[in-house]
Amino acid sequence: MNDQLYQERIVALAKAKTGAGKLENPTKTVRRDNPLCGDRVIVDVKLDGEGRIAEIAHQVRGCLLCQASASALSAVAVGRDATGIAELRHDAERALGREPGETHEPFSAFAPVAAHKSRQDCVLLPLEALKDALA
Amino acid sequence: MSFDVAAVRGQFPILSEIIDGLPVHYLDNGASAQTPLAVIDAVRHYETTGRANVLRGVHRLAERATESYENARAQVATFLGVPTMEIVFTGGCTAAINLVAYSYGSLLKPGDRILLSEIEHHSNIVPWQLLRSRAGIELDMLPVTTDGRIDLEALPRLLTPRTKLVSLAHVSNVTGALLDVRAVVEAAKSVGARVMLDGAQRAPHGPLDLPSLGVDFYAFAGHKAYGPNGIGVLWGRPELLDAMPPFMGGGSMIGRVTLAETTWAPSPRRFEAGTPAIGPAIGLGAACAWMQALDWTGAHDHEMALVQRLMDGLQKIDGTQIFGPASLQNRYPVVSFMLDGVHPHDVAQTLDSFGVAVRAGHHCAQPLMDRFDLDGTTRVSMAPYNDNSDIDALLAGVAHAAKTLR
Ligand SMILES: Cc1ncc(COP(=O)(O)O)c(C=O)c1O
């Protein structure tokens, strides 16, 4: 066996299911699909008066990487506005080796995906959905 | 004598590769099969001793090329049990279906109907949807049973006097189910409808006798049948092909061209505009000859024994479920399964780390996935060169995914 992708931190993030579910009366709900693999993410957010995330929930119909990413995102999204979420996106891109620089928790967990180009969109899909929700 | 799988494996160089320290357990044959030396040699022979354009030159290389190309047509015809000049080379299976949708489709009238099924590959759905928007025809869909077969009980209800064509997968690329062609042809005939089969998943499992099937069109892809990419086949009844206008215009497909008007060459030339994929056609001819020479009684029993081994092994892993026929009757070695709590892409990725190649996802059959509310499946698709070690490696990988990913 030659298993480098599903390392414990990724599996743990997915299993934690942080933020899994729906919100009552969300400010915004956005759905994003990946037509290539069929992954689907629905993100609910409640925003405060200044455009910052007060609450977030997600429903993922997709692979473990997508679930882990949604879980990671939910763990650190509260209190951030669109700019703050864009910073997380850069962190994810750095973990995937698509941008230079150091990554931070929790997205640093996705470093093993850097070697699996075909799976990187799975990690980015929840970030795409949240970006749409804040647009 | 039993089927000599080692001898077959020996003809496929890629199967003895070691890639990143892992052996090649290739179980993604439904997407593309591997290719034997006989095919590689035939293509190499053309490229190194007979490369030229076909049908246009008088020099000896051109004559060699034309002869090899036409010989390939004869090899494909033998494989399908039909006369040589009824074989049209296309760019693939998708291209063959599009050809019929365009050319046969252009003879249809608004309100005419085409009958498909919910199990079809996108390439046997989308060309007809395009035709619908061009020509105002209607599409009907046969439903699929819970064990992954096209539900033929719905035939009488869905066949109407306006139905002009029934186009169905001969073997499903998701469930491996074999179509009851006889029943379809009989019912279609009763309303005067033509029958086309998408043979992409059937052709890789041995020679066919199309006349005895009684169908009107048959399509398959070279790369799934141990041949090269970029080549496919359409067979059609000559009276139908000759009544159809061309799909593409260009060189080689004309009778005579003046600036005012052009007359068409008879089929198959009419449908082979431009320089064809000569090397790939020659390779496909060799692949058909290679299949023709294989002991398919032995090969089929061998493939079905692998299916049984796979099904037995999956059953021992908690939370697996097969989507498709449970019996070995009327099915081919394509097996889809789900593993509870683990997404098919994660199953496939884990299998890759065991050196096992499978396909995961919707298999270009999204309507089918929607119908059964599936996120996708993991698909194991076999060829005669697969052996027990491939299945055992796969089962070990699935067990590992079950243990670590949920
Ligand atoms: C049943 C079926 N039909 C059609 C196709 C399309 O074949 P190609 O992409 O080679 O044209 C496939 C291939 O995936 C298939 O499995």
Image (cartoon, coloured by chain):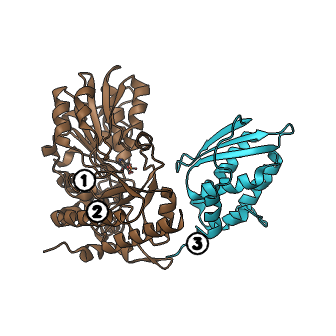
Please state which amino acid type lies under the numbered disc 1. Arg
Label 3: chain?
A
Q: The residue marked by circle 2 belongs to what chain? A: B
Which residue was labeled with disc 3?
A: A4
Q: Which chain is brown?
A: B
Q: Tell me which residue sits at (21%, 62%) in the image.
A: B300
Question: Residue drawn at (17%, 54%), measured in percent from left and top?
Answer: B78
Quarter holding the N terminus of chain B is: bottom left
Q: Which residue is mark 2?
A: B307
C-alpha separation, residue under disc 1 versus residue under disc 2: 10 Å
Q: Amino acid at mark 2?
A: Val
Cα distance in 3D space between marks 1 and 3:
36 Å
Q: Residues within 10 Å of mark 3 (few under 14, many from 20)?
A: few
Residue B107, compared with residue B74, is above or below; it is above
SS at circle 2: helix
The foreground one among B72 and B393 is B393
* Residue shown at 32% from the left, 60% from the top: B227
What is the display colour for chain A? cyan
* 1 and 2 marks on the same chain: yes
Q: Please report contact status of discs 1 and 2: CB closer than 8 Å, yes or no.
A: yes
Q: CA distance from mark 3 to mark 2?
A: 29 Å
* Residue type highlighted by circle 3: Gln
Q: Is mark 1 within 8 Å of ligand 1?
A: no
B360 vs B131: above or below? below
Label 1 or label 2, whichever comes before in sequence order: 2
Asked whether the viewer can see residue B224, the reply is: yes
Element on which disc 3 rests:
loop
Residue marked by disc 1: B331
Q: Secondary structure at mark 1?
A: loop
Residue count near mark 2 (Cα–Cα under 10 Å), binned few <14, some 14–19, many ≥20: many
